[in-house]
Structure formats: structure tokens, C-alpha cells
């Protein structure tokens, strides 16, 4: 699905060329997603900006990712849909809270930007990043991976329909191949 | 210090003649809210410790015309302290969080919690930016709290000091899908379980 097909006519625009984030924002809009729960991550920064600029969406800034799982269960209880944006390190914080979604059949869509994945620089990111999918699947969350920028919107579209049509948590894992891996050594030099 | 308020009395006073109030409870308070009534606009959380206040926030944001009351215990609130910050910056006028503070983990063997060692939950909520944050330890305070919930605006946080007592459980249904759909139908109408 492309941006125009998702009805982006009324969507806010940002500087810079559109990316998968613009397509995903349009998907959110078309699906009437209202609550955007975030723990910021560089990979999500454009999508967060698009949602912040959209008056139909409310950003909920979390102190830890598990808050978002409970938030969106409450949202669904009250008749609203939302999404949870996080980095893979945050998945570990969510596991017990996911019992709420799983035991009550709450729909939940999580977009997870991967670390500890393709070309990672930081050793601390490896244990959680490398086990993100296994841990999610072990607790009962279906995972769909997007390994290229052009796959992200279609993967999100399918996962979103699965989550809200079949009442279960879904995670879209957005590969570091899409996001790029930072080599911190390049950041030690003043530009 | 020996507390004179009893949890079931406090919850009964807060939930009687509740009108359109929506109620969510953390595990220890599940049995208290159910002792008043297995109400269709109750959502008792059987687990997911630390999520009570956040679930209340999601519901309150989705239903701005209704009041949402979260009733939970000190241990459950301690596990979700960050949610005080998350709620405070959004300032939902229709969200009220009441912590039944017995200073113990009553479900797991009455081990002491942090609140009996000086941790001031109401002080933390106030520092986070809650419009109203109070500690209550007597009957007059409970009456005032009820008035603040039903007549006043949130976000409100109340820490109600109660006696540490182990009471017979009053069980709501355990099937989460049933509790969820019963709540949604009562709130949103029968269409809630059909397609949009």
C-alpha cells in the first residue's frame, strides 16, 4: 500500500523526503489509531514527529515500555485503538505485562525497531536484541519482520489487521538493515 | 501505627451509587471492588502487576466524558511508579487513582512493603504533578475523597492508609475475554463485539 492509497491527503507533512514512516503514519490514520504510546528511539523519530503533528492522534510518553501494554488495553476497553512504538531493548520490559493482552484477548500492535541486529556496534544491545523475536514468540506474541524499507508499510498493514481483527498482540520487528547501525566511533570526533 | 480504616468499607463507600463511573482494580483490590458488586463496568486485573494506573489512563483518554477510578494496592502501585509521571504530564481530568495502602504484600504472606518504611506515595504523585494528591487515614478523609472523585476534577491520587488484614476473597469471573467484552458492551453498546 502506498501513501496516497492510504488517504494521506489530510496528513501532516514533514521536511525531507517521505520514508516508510510516512506510509505507516497514513496506515495509522486510515485505521483510526488514536493513542500513540512511545518510548523514543532514533529509528522511530520520523514516525513520532508525524504522529505528534497529527491532531487526531495523542502521544503518550512512557517511562518504560510495559506502561504502553497496559495503556492500550485500557484504550481498547474504552473503544479506542492505539499502537506502541519502542526499541527492541524495551521488549524485555514488557513480557509480564503482555499477560494482560494475552489472557484477555486485547488487540495490541507493537512496532519494534531492532538493535543487536544487523551490524550492531554496542555489545550491551546484543543480549536483548538477539533474543527479541524468540522471547516474544515464547510468551505468545506473533512477530512479523521487515528487513527492507519497502517492506515496512505492508508488514505493518498486515500485522495491524491481524491484531485488531483477531484480538491478539502482534509485533513488527523493523530490522537494523532498514534503520542502519551507528558506529559510535564516528561520533567521538567534533564535526 | 495501627490503622483504623478497613479496605472493604473504604471501597464500598467509594463505589456505592457510582452512576456512570468506570472502575479498574489491581489484584489486591479485585476482591474489594467485587465485594461491592460484580459490576459490568468493573475491570478487575487478575495479574499484570504495575499496570493498573496505566490501564486507567488508556481508558480515561478513550472516554473523556466519564470518570475512571483505579483502585489498587501499595505493592502494585510501587511496581508502576513511572506511570505517575506518565499520567501527570497528560493531566487527564477524569482519572482518579486510589491506593489502598496496608504497607504490606497481603496476598503473598504479609511481607512489609516500602510504604511502611517511609515511602510517601502521595508525595511522589504530588511531585510528579498530579493536580490533587492526598493521604487519608480516617473516615472524614474518605468522605472528602469520595466528594473529590464524584464532584471534582482529576488527575487525583489518594493513598488511603488501611489496616493490614487478610479477608475472604470475593471472586469476579476469571475469563479475561468475558470481563473485557462485558465491560465493552456495557460501555459502548452491543456493537462493541461486532465489526465497526
Image (tube, grey):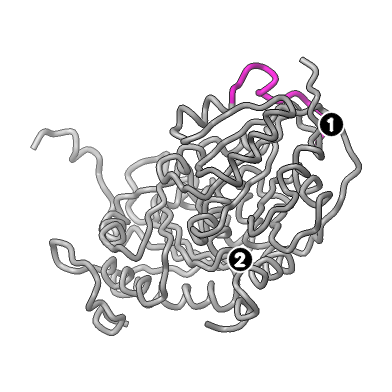
Instruction: Say which residue appears at 44% left-offset and 33% top-offset.
Output: B129
Question: Against A108, is B98 above or below?
Answer: above
Q: How crowded is mark 2: few (under 14 residues within 10 Å), some or many (20 or more)?
A: many
* Residue furthest top in the image: B1
Camera-nearest residue between A69 and B67: B67
Picture disc at residue B109: 1
Residue B143, image x and y in percent?
69, 35
Residue range of the region highlighted in magenta in the rendering:
B108-120
Which chain hosts label 1?
B
Instruction: Say which residue appears at 18% left-offset and 40% top-offset.
Output: A186
Picture disc at residue A106: 2
Examine the rendering and report whether any part of residue A51 can be seen: yes
Instruction: Say which residue appears at 55% left-offset and 48% top-offset.
Output: B54
Q: How crowded is mark 1: few (under 14 residues within 10 Å), some or many (20 or more)?
A: few
* Image side of residue A184 versus residue B149, left or right: left
Question: Against B20, is A19 above or below?
Answer: below
Examine the rendering and report whether any part of residue A116 can be seen: no
Q: In which quarter of the image is residue A101?
A: bottom right
Residue A88, image x and y in percent?
44, 52
B91 drawn magenta: no
- Labels 2 and 1 share a subunit: no
Q: Is mark 2 on a helix, strand or loop?
A: loop
Camera-nearest residue between B43 and A105: B43
Q: In which quarter of the image is residue B81?
A: top right
Q: Distance between the residues labelled 2 and 1?
A: 31 Å
Which chain hosts label 2?
A
Q: Is mark 1 on a helix, strand or loop?
A: loop
Camera-nearest residue between A3 and B115: B115
Amino acid at each position: 500500500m502506498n501513501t496516497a492509497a492510504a488517504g494521506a491527503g489530510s496528513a501532516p507533512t514533514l521536511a525531507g523526503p517521505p520514508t516508510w514512516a510516512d506510509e505507516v503514519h497514513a496506515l495509522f490514520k486510515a485505521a483510526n489509531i488514536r493513542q500513540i504510546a512511545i518510548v523514543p528511539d532514533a529509528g522511530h523519530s520520523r514516525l513520532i514527529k508525524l504522529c505528534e503533528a497529527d491532531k487526531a492522534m495523542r502521544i503518550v510518553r512512557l517511562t518504560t515500555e510495559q506502561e504502553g501494554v497496559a495503556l492500550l488495553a485500557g484504550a481498547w476497553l474504552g473503544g479506542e485503538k492505539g499502537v506502541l512504538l519502542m526499541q527492541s531493548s524495551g521488549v524485555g520490559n514488557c513480557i509480564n505485562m503482555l499477560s494482560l493482552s494475552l489472557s484477555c484477548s486485547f488487540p495490541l500492535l507493537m512496532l519494534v525497531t531492532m538493535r543487536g541486529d544487523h551490524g550492531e556496534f554496542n555489545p550491551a544491545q546484543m543480549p536483548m536484541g538477539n533474543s527479541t523475536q524468540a522471547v516474544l514468540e515464547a510468551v505468545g506474541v506473533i512477530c512479523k519482520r521487515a528487513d527492507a524499507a519497502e517492506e515496512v508499510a505492508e508488514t505493518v498493514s498486515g500485522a495491524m489487521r491481524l491484531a485488531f481483527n483477531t484480538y491478539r498482540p502482534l509485533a513488527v520487528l523493523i530490522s537494523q538493515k532498514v534503520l542502519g547501525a551507528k558506529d559510535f566511533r564516528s561520533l567521538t570526533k567534533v564535526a | 501505627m495501627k490503622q483504623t480504616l478497613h479496605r472493604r468499607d473504604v471501597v464500598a463507600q467509594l463505589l456505592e451509587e457510582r452512576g456512570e463511573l468506570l472502575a479498574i482494580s489491581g489484584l489486591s483490590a479485585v476482591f474489594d471492588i467485587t465485594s461491592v458488586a460484580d459490576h459490568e463496568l468493573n475491570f478487575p486485573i487478575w495479574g499484570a502487576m504495575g499496570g493498573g494506573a496505566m490501564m486507567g489512563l488508556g481508558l480515561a483518554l478513550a472516554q473523556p466524558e466519564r470518570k475512571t477510578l483505579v483502585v489498587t494496592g501499595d505493592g502494585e502501585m510501587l511496581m508502576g511508579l513511572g506511570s505517575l509521571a506518565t499520567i501527570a504530564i497528560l493531566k487527564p481530568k477524569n482519572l482518579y487513582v486510589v491506593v489502598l495502602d496496608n504497607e504490606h504484600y497481603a496476598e503473598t504472606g504479609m511481607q512489609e512493603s516500602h510504604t511502611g518504611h517511609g515511602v510517601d506515595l502521595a508525595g511522589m504523585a504530588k511531585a510528579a504533578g498530579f493536580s490533587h494528591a492526598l493521604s487519608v487515614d480516617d473516615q472524614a478523609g474518605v468522605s472528602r475523597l469520595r466528594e473529590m472523585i464524584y464532584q471534582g476534577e482529576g488527575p487525583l491520587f489518594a493513598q488511603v492508609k488501611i489496616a493490614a488484614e487478610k479477608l475472604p476473597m470475593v471472586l469476579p469471573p476469571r475469563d479475561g475475554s468475558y470481563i473485557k467484552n462485558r465491560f465493552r458492551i456495557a460501555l459502548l453498546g452491543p456493537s462493541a463485539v461486532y465489526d465497526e
